[in-house]
Amino acid sequence: MRRAQVGGTTLGWRPGLLLAVACALAGCSKGSGGAAPTVEPVVTLGQENVARAEPQELRSGPGISGTLQARKAAAVRAEVGGTILDIKAEQGQTVKQGQELARIEVLSQMDQLLAARSAVRAASTALQVARAEEERSAKLAEAGVITRRDFERIQLSVSQAQGQLAEARSRVALAQEQVGRSRITAPFDGVVSERQASAGDVVQPGTPLFTVVDPRTLRLEASVPAARLEQVKVGTSVEFQVTGYGERAFTGKVERINPVVDPATGQVRLYVAIPNTDLQLLAGLFAEGRVASQSRQALAVPVDAVDTTRGETSVLRVQSERVQRVPVKLGLRDDVAEWVEVRSGLQAGDVVLLGSARDEVGEGSRVKVDAPSPGAKPVEDEGPGVGGSAAPPAP
């Protein structure tokens, strides 16, 4: 740490807070025989140590962050076992509902289908024979050639033949369904985000093949403290920024609120619906923002300028090169921008101390604001004498 020796007193130089001591002492010559007059030191403040009270667009609401996810996504899996014959979709490809993505070779299912169809033909023939026998037996029964009991047995055989035919047809339907499952299709309009299999792979039922997502609507899952839940309602607007898009702002709306508070964190889960009809946002990107429950234009200062340690809320204002403690009344607080509304105590343009300057510079101290770096917006006390000499001229 650099130190300056002035008149027997050592003054420390703190990072971000420049201490310029005006020590131009008049009459330093011993010839006068009198003591040198005491000169009050001037503290020079860097631009990072001060801010100006000015109107700001303030928004109040809990901050949120999370990863964007596809609101509608499906894992397409194999429903039958076999060898993949062909892959007809790749990652990033847009697909329509019912569009074929792949086909699985199912020889055993085809064999079962052929056998079931043969069984249907046999059962149909058996039913025809049974019905013809029933017609002949009915005439013989009327003529008294056969007994009523024999005729009932023939009717029973017709019923059995009908049951066999129905069973054979159900086997055909089941076999056709199994064969149809060998054709892998898109469950809805969307985009293929993942392809987990290739042509020639042997798969079993349940093997993941594709992931299809609908990117037109995304979802952001985030948490807010339960203590601030009153600021969050279904339909409340959410403002956020996304990694990779600079300062560009996006909006969504709270779609659902989890009715259970996480006992470990005291947080409540939110589900935010984000329209993405232009397909500019991508699932998997990190988003950070806030629930915009209130918004208004108001005179504000940075949160770092406010002191609440003395039993009242106050700021240190620089006026006419002097530091003054001013009580203030605060209003809306913007936790994301880290500014807070000042309802009384300051006027637009007032310069206030921040951070370490607020803690280190005493009330009543004489200060001046250091010149800003090239291109930076200056923050200076508008009182008289700012920008002048750091010390009075020697007599």
Image: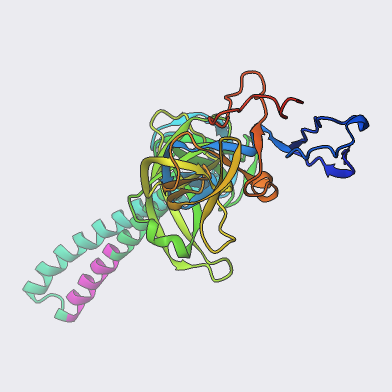
Check the picture and name the quadrant holding the C terminus: top right
Rendered residue at 21%/63% (across/down): 133
Q: Is residue 21 left or right of residue 299?
A: right
Q: Is residue 124 left or right of residue 68?
A: left
The question of residue 136 being in magenta is answered with no
Colour logic: rainbow
Q: Which residues are magenta?
A: 149-162
Whether 226 is drawn above or below 289: the answer is below
Rendered residue at 63%/24% (across/down): 387
Whether 380 is drawn above or below 60: the answer is above
SS majority, magenta: helix
Q: Residue furthest right?
A: 30
Q: Nearer the viewer, residue 128 or 120?
A: 120
Whether 254 is drawn above or below 144: the answer is above
Residue 51: x, y in percent? 56, 37
Residue 189: x, y in percent? 39, 36
Q: Nearer the viewer, residue 247 or 27?
A: 27
Whether 60 is drawn above or below 243: the answer is below
Q: Is residue 151 left or right of residue 389?
A: left
Residue 112, can we see it? yes
Q: Nearer the viewer, residue 351 or 34?
A: 34
Residue 20: x, y in percent? 76, 34
Q: How many marks?
A: 0
- Which of the 4 quarters of the picture holds residue 141? bottom left
